[in-house]
Image (cartoon, grey):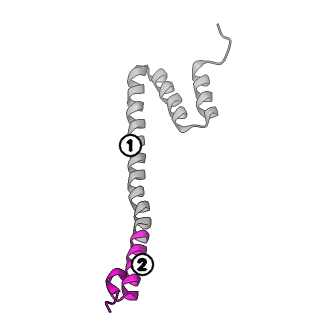
Amino acid sequence: MRLGSNRRKALHNFGTRAGVDDLNSLANVLLQADRFGTGISTALRDMEKSIRHKRRQKAEERASNTAVTLLIPLILLSTRRSSTLTLQRAYFGFAPPTLMTSQD
């Protein structure tokens, strides 16, 4: 019956060996539930809520950074287009080339 280390030591080793923060927190949640005698289901539900909250925050941060990242190419492209139109109008005398034909 006593073939390996006890459950607490196994969970602690699992959390530290994995090197992933979420797995480490899972091991800690299971250890605390075991130590304090609380239900594992409630501990896992609370952990689930915190993980979803962190994931939502990361998504909101990415979304706010995306707007800024897309703004720079948009400005560059619109500035390029408007400067091209301005140079064309200056070259052709503020009229399209089709209207600049002389009628002799």
Residue nearest the viewer, comparing 11 with 92: 92
Q: Can residue 38 be spotted in the picture?
A: no
Q: On residue 29, which mark appears?
A: none
In the drawing, what numbered circle is on residue 56?
A: 1
Main SS, magenta residues: helix
How many other residues sit within 10 Å of disc 1, few (<14), some (14-19) or many (≥20)?
few
Residue 65 at least partly seen = yes
Q: Amino acid at mark 2?
A: Thr
Q: Decide: few, some or many residues near mark 2? Use Cα within 10 Å; few <14, some 14-19, many ≥20.
A: few
In depth, the one of 45 and 67 nearer the eye is: 67
Q: Earlier in the sequence, mark 2 or mark 1?
A: 1
Q: Residue at x 40, y 66 (%)?
A: 74
60 above or below 10?
Answer: below
Q: Say above or below: 81 vs 12.
A: below
The verdict on residue 5 being magenta is no
Q: Residue at x 58, y 25 (%)?
A: 11
Which residue is more in the foreground, 89 or 76? 89
Position of 103 with respect to 39 (left or right) is: left
> Disc 2 and disc 1: Cα gap in Å?
42 Å
If the image is split into quadrants, where does the N terminus sit?
Answer: top right
Observer-side mark, 2 or 1, equals 2
The answer to whether the residue labelled 2 contacts the one labelled 1, judged by CB atoms less than 8 Å apart, is no
Amino acid type at image mark 1? Arg
- Residue 31: where, in percent of width, then height? 51, 25
Q: Which residue is under mark 2?
A: 84
- Return the residue found at the far right: 3
Total residue callouts: 2
Q: Quadrant of residue 83?
A: bottom left
Q: Is residue 24 above or below residue 104?
A: above
Q: Which residues are magenta?
A: 77-104
